[in-house]
Image (cartoon, grey):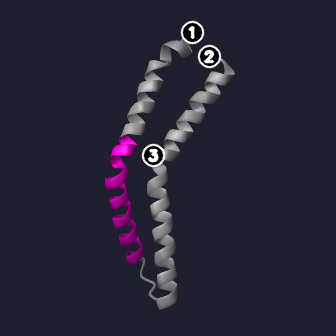
Amino acid sequence: MTADGTIDTIRNAFLVALQVAGPALMATLVIGLLVGVFQASTQVNEPSVTFLAKLVGVGVVLSVAGPFMIAQLVEYARQSIGSIAHMVR
């Protein structure tokens, strides 16, 4: 395997990881920011509010984007397993 092939494999792994983890992380970030602004403006400092809001938000995002995430993982695994013979040469 050449250096270019190694770099492409690692780049693809990072892109798939970003596509799979990105939606949930972005939802957590946005919800945390909104709840933080709400708590700062109302002076309600209850940690369970943030946790529950993030939990519900990530659950919704995973149920909506879950099929896309699974398809990306399956396609990456299929390509990786298919290219093993080419990597060993």
Q: Which of 61 and 87 is in front in this view?
A: 61
- Which type of secondary structure does the marked residue at label 3 adopt? helix
Q: Nearer the viewer, mark 2 or mark 3?
A: 3
- Residue linked to disc 2: 1
Mark 2 / mark 3, whichever is N-terminal: 2
- Residue linked to disc 1: 89
User: Are the residues tagged 1 and 2 within 8 Å (C-beta)?
Assistant: yes
- Locate residue 37, reporting x and y percent: 51, 81
53 drawn magenta = yes
> Which segment did they paint magenta?
48-70
Q: Which of marks 1 and 3 is in front?
A: 3
User: Are the residues tagged 2 and 3 within 8 Å (C-beta)?
Assistant: no
Mark 1 / mark 3, whichever is N-terminal: 3
Say few, some or many: other residues with alpha carbon within 10 Å of mark 1 (under 14 / 14 to 19 / 20 or more): few
Say few, some or many: other residues with alpha carbon within 10 Å of mark 3 (under 14 / 14 to 19 / 20 or more): many
CA separation, marks 1 and 2? Answer: 7 Å
- Which type of secondary structure does the marked residue at label 1 adopt? loop
Q: What residue type is labelled 3?
A: Val
In which quadrant of the rendered view does residue 55 lie? bottom left
The residue located at (49%, 67%) in the rendering is 30
- Residue linked to disc 3: 20
